[in-house]
Image (spheres, rainbow, N blue to C red):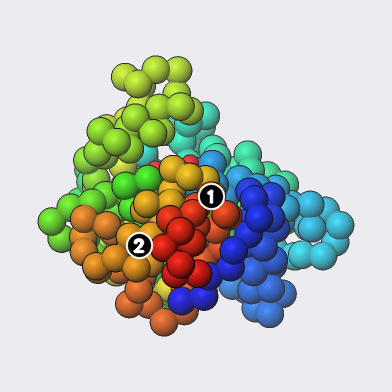
């Protein structure tokens, strides 16, 4: 695991965008595993800027997202499909037919999870998986639990996550209670992983993820078992790790 200490959110975003850019330059037909949430917004903004300057070409890139709220259509402005178009896909030359995200409107969870697992397999593996981290250590929507979930599954969101994500919705009641998410096995099979974290609210989760026990109650701790993980985190997110003299 390599940890890059960024000064602040902007520095984290630029460093992360540099790593994704390098991936796309080295392998123009990369399969990128993408993430939503406020943390990667700056990374996407930077990638769009570099694309507009002519430094990046997404024509052959394929993108597969981690998760989607169950019950939201792709045109709902709180859906992750909408987020991806708003922050990245609408601004670069990626072929929208090469972008994949769970279908929030499919009510049959078993059917949708099986379909999405098949999508991931058909892409032949993820070259670089971008991840944020929840304050409770979740990755994608793999919530803390009794066991690591393997593949795409329907998740009952925890109260913590519903509360944290309610800042994007008009009220707490409007936050969906369920989501479709890639599982830990899908994530761990990515050839490389880039986790971004910013802010004090992530410091405890990041410390436990990197230095704690590998337990399903901290889903991100499984990343300790992956052989190609890069963490780009700012001073605040690394504050506990630094206080303990681990970095
Ligand atoms: C959401 C997403 C995750 C994201 C996390 C943190 O629930 N499903 O993929 O990493 O929460 O979000 P943020 O970056 O907004 O703190």
Residue 84 location in percent, x, y? 56, 45
Residue 197 location in percent, x, y? 51, 53
The residue located at (68%, 44%) in the rendering is 90
Residue 202 location in percent, x, y? 43, 48
- Image region (quadrant) for ligand 1: top left
The tag earlier along the polypeptide, 1 or 2, is 2
| Most distant residue in the left direction | 146
Nearest the camera: 104 or 226? 226
* Mark 1 neighbour class, 10 Å CA radius: few under 14, some 14 to 19, many 20 or more: many
Name the residue tied to disc 1: 236
Nearest the camera: 161 or 122? 161
Against 70, residue 102 (above or below) is below
Name the residue tied to disc 2: 209
The residue located at (65%, 78%) in the rendering is 27
Residue 158 placement, left or right of 242? left
Q: Is mark 1 within 8 Å of ligand 1?
A: no
Residue 121 location in percent, x, y? 37, 71
């Amino acid at each position: 695991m390599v940890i890059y200490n960024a000064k602040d959110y902007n520095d984290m975003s630029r460093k992360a965008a540099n790593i994704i850019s390098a991936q796309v330059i080295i392998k123009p037909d990369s399969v990128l595993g993408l993430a939503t949430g406020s943390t990667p917004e700056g990374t996407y903004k930077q990638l769009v800027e570099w694309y507009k300057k002519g430094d990046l070409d997404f024509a052959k890139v394929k993108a597969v997202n981690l998760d989607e709220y169950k019950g939201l259509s792709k045109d709902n402005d709180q859906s992750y499909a909408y987020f991806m178009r708003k922050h990245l896909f609408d601004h670069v030359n990626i072929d929208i037919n090469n972008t994949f995200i769970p279908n929030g409107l499919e009510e049959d969870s078993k059917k949708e999870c099986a379909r999405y697992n098949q999508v991931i397999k058909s892409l032949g593996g993820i070259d670089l998986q971008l991840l944020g981290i929840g304050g409770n250590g979740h990755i994608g929507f793999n919530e803390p639990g009794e066991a690591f979930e393997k593949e795409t599954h329907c998740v009952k969101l925890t109260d913590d996550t519903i509360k944290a994500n309610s800042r994007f919705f008009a009220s707490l009641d409007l936050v969906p209670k369920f989501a479709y998410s890639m599982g830990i096995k899908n994530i761990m099979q990515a050839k490389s992983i880039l986790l971004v974290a910013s802010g004090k609210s992530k410091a405890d989760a990041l410390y436990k993820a990197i230095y704690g026990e590998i337990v399903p109650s901290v889903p991100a701790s499984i990343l300790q078992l992956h052989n190609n993980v890069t963490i780009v985190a700012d001073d605040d997110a690394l504050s506990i790790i630094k206080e303990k003299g681990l970095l």
